[in-house]
Amino acid sequence: MIFKNLLSKRDAISLLELIHTSLFCSSEEDFKELVNKLNEVISYDFAISGVARTDSYGNVVSYKIVNVNYPAEWLDIYTAKNLYSIDSIVKENFTNFRLQRWKDTFRKHLTPREFLSRAGDFGLRDGFTHGQRNRTGSRGSIFTISGNSIEFNNRTEMILELVAPHLHQTIARIADEQNRNNTISLSKREREVLNWLREGKSSWDISQILHISERTVIFHIENIKKKLDVVNRLQAVAVAVQQGLIGVE
């Protein structure tokens, strides 16, 4: 009912197309095109994303940025003056990994006026940031949109919540230097379970189809999530399709 009230049929189709496209992004340029498609569904002026590796305490130890269209001069200042150390948006993201509106975070962390003033000079006064960590907590993503054209409402928030897991998988995959195709091995049963998850079946449904207990199905799903380094079933299906572990149809 919530989806019906907030998202139009056109919205739903556009989001499904965006999610499908995300499965086949293999470069930074692909990712930028993907984010530009999001701009057809929600309004924003600037977008940037990145993925970071963190230590056991949650501190960022390495960071890769994919700049979609953020002001280059601001990024130069940000890097040169190490503004990351006082950026409450980044701190909040890599601490809690949830959707945040900037103005709320700025109040929560009492962000320095000089930082707010400098960002404001480039039109970066308010926005949304969302991120997600992988299953082990060793890597996290950040995705930010900003600008005067953003509509700060429930619809925008819902869409960002829906696309965030897929943006995370895409940016993490692109930034990952290792080829995971040669390291992931799924059993025949795990592939069967994944194929039924792709069809939208519940654990109970799958147990009935495969004639095994629901507990066994859940056991297989947890193993699949560990192997694919994801946190939920939708991500598991998305990564499995992208890696060619199961078919699209």
Image (spheres, rainbow, N blue to C red):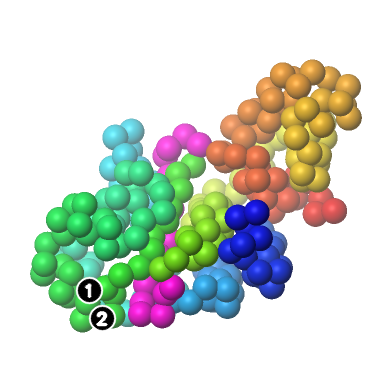
Q: Secondary structure at mark 2?
A: loop
Callout 2 amino acid = Phe
Residue 4 position, x and y percent, is: 66, 60
Q: In the rendered image, which residue does mark 2 sit on? A: 122
Q: Residue 234 occupies which quadrant of the picture?
A: top right
User: To which quarter of the image does residue 139 belong?
Assistant: top left
Q: Is residue 129 left or right of residue 193?
A: left
Whether residue 187 is visible, yes or no, is no
The amino acid type found where label 1 is placed reads: Ala
Quadrant in which residue 40 is drawn? bottom right
Do the CB atoms of the residues marked 2 and 1 lie less than 8 Å apart? yes
Q: Residue at horizontal 41%, vertical 68%?
A: 152
Nearest the eye: 173 or 100? 100
What secondary structure is found at the residue carrying circle 1? helix
Question: Residue drawn at (15%, 56%), measured in percent from left and top?
Answer: 110
The foreground one among 41 and 247 is 41
Tell me the crowding category of disc 1: few under 14, some 14 to 19, or many 20 or more residues within 10 angstroms, Cα based.
Answer: some
Location of residue 231 with respect to 25 vertically, above or below:
above
Q: In the visual, does 145 lie left or right of 104?
A: right
Q: CA distance from mark 2 to mark 1?
A: 6 Å
In reply to whether residue 139 is colored magenta, the answer given is: yes
Identify the mark at residue 9; answer none if there is no mark: none
Instruction: Depth check: give the residue in front, 176 or 193.
Output: 193
Task: Specify the quadrant that holds the N terminus.
Answer: bottom right
Image position, residue 42 (x, y; %): 52, 73
Q: Which residues are magenta?
A: 135-151
Label 2 Cα neighbours within 10 Å, binned few <14 / some 14-19 / many ≥20: some
Q: Which residue is mark 1?
A: 119
Is 144 contained in the magenta span?
yes
Q: Is residue 213 above or below residue 93?
A: above
Residue at horizontal 27 percent and vertical 51 percent from the top: 91
Residue 98 placed where, x, y %? Answer: 41, 49
